[in-house]
Image (cartoon, rainbow, N blue to C red):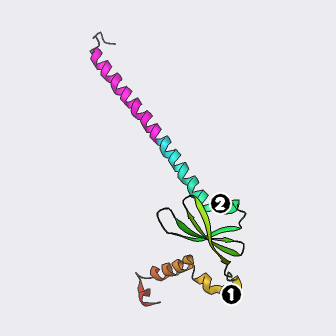
């Protein structure tokens, strides 16, 4: 060991302590921001899952289905609801629901009558067909269809 006295002044030690406190404060702020981002991500994931599973339809036992709706005013809507084999046209607004019209639901096409034509028109099938068609654009198969 050398016999030279230490040259660190008390002001230098205080500046190091202040710098260390700033780093600790930034680390705490970073942890808080990460925790907040995690909570927001969990909320968004739960919302997406709830929309996908549609708990409202299950709560009604599957007998109630919203066929369509249209806004009539700022707070008024006309809603078509299917209950078993009946369509109800409802006016919704101002905290009230009024039945406007009632009719038999149109017959749904059966799987046998639609055949493969309806299945071919599904978006996934059309999209796959378009991808296959566009995959050959760069090569010698460009002129082929």
Report whether residue 144 is seen. yes
Where in the figure is residue 91, as x and y percent of width and height? Answer: 57, 67
Residue 36 drawn above or below residue 132: above
Q: Nearer the viewer, residue 19 or 77?
A: 77
Which residue occupies 45% across, 90% down?
144
Where in the figure is residue 96, as x and y percent of width and height? Answer: 59, 60
Q: Residues within 10 Å of mark 1 (few under 14, many from 20)?
A: few
Q: Residues within 10 Å of mark 2 (few under 14, many from 20)?
A: few
Where in the figure is residue 19, as x and y percent of width and height? Answer: 34, 27
Where in the figure is residue 8, as x and y percent of width and height? Answer: 28, 16
Residue 137: quarter of image = bottom left
Magenta run includes residue 49: no
Mark 2, residue position: 56
Residue 45: quarter of image = bottom right
Left or right placement of residue 65 versus residue 78 in this view: right
Secondary element under disc 1, as helix, strand or loop, is: helix
* Region in magenta: 5-33
Secondary element under disc 2, as helix, strand or loop, is: helix
Which residue occupies 51% across, 48% down?
40
Mark toward the viewer: 1 or 2: 2
Residue 66: quarter of image = bottom right
Residue 113: image tag: 1
**Marks 1/2: CA distance?**
30 Å
Instruction: Name the chief secondary structure element in magenta.
Output: helix
Picture quarter with the N terminus: top left
**Numbered label tally:** 2
Disc 1 or 2, which lies upstream in sequence? 2
């Amino acid at each position: 060991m050398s016999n030279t006295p230490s040259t660190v002044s008390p002001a230098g030690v205080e500046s190091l302590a202040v710098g260390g406190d700033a780093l600790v404060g930034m680390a705490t702020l970073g942890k808080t921001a990460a925790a907040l981002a995690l909570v927001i991500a969990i909320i968004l994931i739960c919302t997406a899952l709830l929309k996908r599973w549609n708990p409202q339809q299950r709560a009604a036992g599957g007998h109630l289905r919203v066929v369509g709706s249209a806004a009539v005013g700022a707070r008024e809507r006309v809603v078509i609801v299917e209950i078993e084999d009946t369509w109800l046209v409802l006016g919704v607004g101002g905290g009230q629901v009024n039945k406007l019209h009632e009719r038999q639901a149109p017959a749904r096409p059966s799987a046998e009558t639609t055949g493969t034509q309806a299945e071919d028109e599904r978006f996934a099938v059309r999209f796959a067909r378009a991808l296959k068609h566009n995959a050959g654009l760069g090569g010698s198969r460009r002129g082929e269809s």
